[in-house]
Amino acid sequence: MATWEEIAEALVDYQQSCNSNQRLRRVQRDWSKVINFTCLDDPTVIFQMTVVKGEITEWHSGYAAQHDIHVRATSEDFADMFWGDLNPSRKYLQGEIKVEGSQEDVMRLDAITSIIWPDV
Amino acid sequence: MSGAGLPALRRSLGLRSTTAVSAGLAFAAIDYLGGVTVAIFVAGDAAWLAILAAGILCLLAALAFSELNSLYPTAAAIRLYMRNSMDDRVALTITFTYMTTIILIIAADAFIVGRAVQYVLFPDQDFLSLPIIAALIGLAVFSNLQGVRMAGNLQEIVTYSALAITVVVSVVALALHGFRFDNPITGVFGAGTNPVLAVVYGIFLFSAFEWVTTTAEEARKPSLVPKGMLVALVLLYIGTAAFTMALTAYFPDHAALRTVPYPQLLMAQRALGVGGLVAMFVATGLTAMNTFNGGFLTASRFIYAASREGNLPRSLSRLNVNAVPWVPVLALGIISLVVATLVYVTGAWLILVSVGAALEAMIYAVAAYCVIVLRRRRRDAAREFRMPFGYVTPVAALIVFGGLALVAAFADPNNPSGFSLVPAAILAGMGIVSAVYVIVVTPRLRQRVAATAAPRRPRRPPRSQ
């Protein structure tokens, strides 16, 4: 089980990788969302991320009162996903990652990984 | 707040929206031809009864999808419940075959709308139909590639408007006809009728209503998806039954309608003149907007996911600058154009209704099978909804829809005797292509993905013990 510190370390790298990828920023330029995350194996680990026009502007622990997407997965899957070591689509289609949100948002979330780490 | 103290999701769908999604995906321009197909196999004005029987059967399918949806409330439900009920290769084969329904409907709608545009704007220039069809598909592909999507509210307005126009025009037409009906009940039976085929084709009128289950993660409450399906079935029944009644009232020789790809325009024109023609032309255009928006979106996103899962080539998950999986959109457009051209050249548009009816009945039977298997395999899994009467309803649905799929596969409304091997041959062709792909190509794709991933060192730093 990954700790919040491990997930936070992964999020630092994820934010840097996303924001520095020009192609991703261009593709996601019309995508502004507030996303809540819940760890299924430790429901006390909850966090949120704000994406503004494709740029991850902030993330921190706790839920956002108003959100567009809610992602639930194990802490290990979150850590692997933010490090770019996990294919979110595959886990989603296996029912191991659960997403509340539109189909479009599910694809956009996965697109982050597929654009930054195309070999995953 | 929702659930266990969780904040509420923004822009989640209510009952009006889930109903609109369900009805909008089902109510395509080809439903007008579906109405003709039902009418061909009954006498007088009895089509409403066959459509009612089909609607009640679709209720069984809705119950099955509701149970599966409550077990897997996700857009990926079809992959999950089929994978967990049967061998994954069989599940994938069925899924790929099922997806071809969307291509058929896009192609059929392009053909019907193209012919309708030609009839209204260029009545004596039949040769313009094909360029118009190509232009419509081209426009749909272009707008999809640009990332143009109908906003949720607009989608609802389009769906409800198309249904409302169809019902109002049909009811006014019936009123002008004095509500005089010829054998409205006994016409189902008797010489020259085939009630089973009429019901089979009636099922086609409701097809795709179940796709609303892919919005499970957007609904405010899980129960809104089943409720949306039920309300949509009622609305679809009212729309298609009213239209078919009006059609048969004005065209007592149902068989003659086989040769017309825009019966809704002829009925409205005969009953209400130019005003009726324009109203029905608008309704036809609105149904096509839904098909081109929802059809392209649903199919291309499914293909994207299948590609990312490793079951389709990686190139199918490439996104353009508008975040659109451009290869699937382009491929869907090209295949739809080929199918629409074939339909135009052969004039056998009603065969699409047969193939579509068989595919839909097949997937309803598969859904019932999945309910039965998952009740055994996931006995203790939480379900907010169960099909009533234990195993009676899923087993009945499996038998009924399995039988109806077989009947539809060997039926052709273009043939006065109703029998044909063509739909079965088309379905077998699609099934064989899907199966060969899944057995031969998919394992190679997965191997390639694994080979690409193997040399890649994980980016996540190892834990220090």
Image (spheres, grey):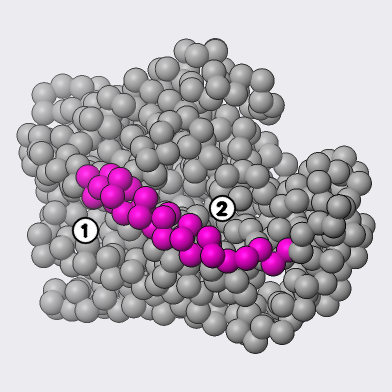
Q: Nearer the viewer, residue B281 or B299?
A: B299
- Residue B398: x %, y % from top left: 38, 23
The residue that label 2 is drawn on is: A90
Asked if residue A11 lies left or right of residue A96, the reply is right
Query: Residue B452 lies in magenta, yes or no?
Result: yes
Q: Is residue B440 among what the camera can see?
A: yes
**Element type at mark 2:** helix
> Which x, y percent locates residue B200?
28, 33
Which residue is denoted by mark 1 in the rendering?
Answer: B261
The answer to whether any part of residue B163 appears in the image is no
Magenta stretch in the rendered image: B432-460
Q: Main secondary structure of the magenta part?
A: helix
Horizontally, residue B274 falls left or right of residue B150, namely: left
Number of the front mark, 2 or 1: 2
Answer few, some or many: residues within 10 Å of disc 1's Cα (few below 14, many 20 plus, some between 14 and 19). Answer: many
Q: In 3D space, how far apart are the residues under numbered discs 2 and 1 (Cα atoms)?
A: 43 Å
Q: Considering only vertical position in the picture, is B250 above or below B58? A: below
